[in-house]
Amino acid sequence: MTWLVSAFVGMISGLAGLFLAGLIAIACVSWYQISSREGESGYFVIFIALFGGFVGITIGFLTARTIAWSIGPGFGRELLGAMVAVLLVSATSILICRVLADIAPTIDGQELDLQVEFRFPDSYGLDERPNADGDWLYTFASLSGMTRRKDCVGTIQWDECRYEEGQWIVPTCASLFTERGKRNVMLAQREATEVMSFLLPLPARPSAEYERWSDWIPRQQANGEPWPSNKMSCRFRVQKIVSPPDPQP
């Protein structure tokens, strides 16, 4: 009889696991940008929910049997223990999924663009635009340690570049697609064998103060001397992505 009680508890736990896993899967569809094309996101939610139901049955039954063996059989205490176990596993799962997801930070509920201006070495003269000597690529990356775990290609706004105080300044833009990792930007020729990249002192969730331009970085060399004008430097800011207005009827 006690085995039947534990089995019933396991079935209830399975239903709870199925429901909670479905909620986690729905959140993951957004967090991991799972496509809805050809029902991909729907199949994902169904598969995860069914898997959660199976795990819930297993955890619930094993927890119920452990309680029945160690404390004594009883529907109420076995169900309570099983529900606590399922909730703990669900909470841990959603925490892990949230931490590992690339979720874009926001300011006032709006996602952000990362704008970076690169100041070129003074070896480029007024009559020598930087893009005249080859094709350039701009990337924004999230680093894990010193490894580029994920990156995106941004746009180089050559039509807005300008010449100031003997140096070309080239604006760029990329989506600030994640809160995770250190922020790294790189602007280099596609065929270059040696490139220079910059770590930006930008927090995971920028506040409104980061909508203003930063100072030029790096500020100084390793020996403490000011950063030379014959090396590239950059500055950055974030800007809210403004949705276009609805078309007028």
Image (cartoon, rainbow, N blue to C red):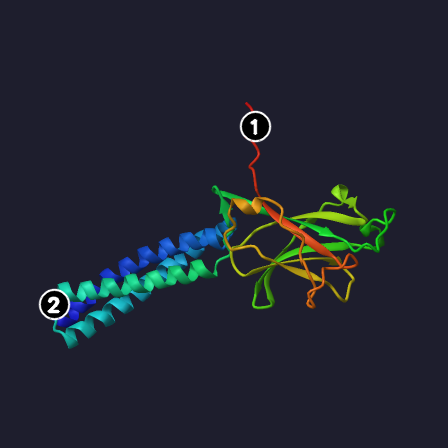
Q: Is residue 237 visible?
A: yes
- Whichever of callouts 2 and 1 sits on the residue coming sooner in the sequence is 2
Report the side of 178 relative to 57 (left or right): right
Closer to us: 79 or 194: 194
Amino acid type of the residue tagged 1 in the rendering: Pro
Q: Are marks 2 and 1 in contact (CB under 8 Å)?
A: no
Bin the neighbour count of mark 1 within 10 Å (Cα to Cα): few under 14, some 14-19, many 20 and up: few
- Which x, y percent locates residue 166? 81, 49
- Which x, y percent locates residue 241? 57, 41
Please report the residue visible at 25 percent of the width from the left and 67 percent of the height from the top.
60
- Which x, y percent locates residue 179? 51, 55
Closer to us: 192 or 165: 165
Please report the residue visible at 36 percent of the width from the left and 63 percent of the height from the top.
92
Report the side of 46 relative to 83 (left or right): right
Which residue is the extreme one toward the right? 127
Q: Which corner quadrant holds the N terminus?
A: bottom left
Which residue is the extreme one toward the bottom? 70
The label on residue 74 is 2
The residue indicated by pointer 1 is 247
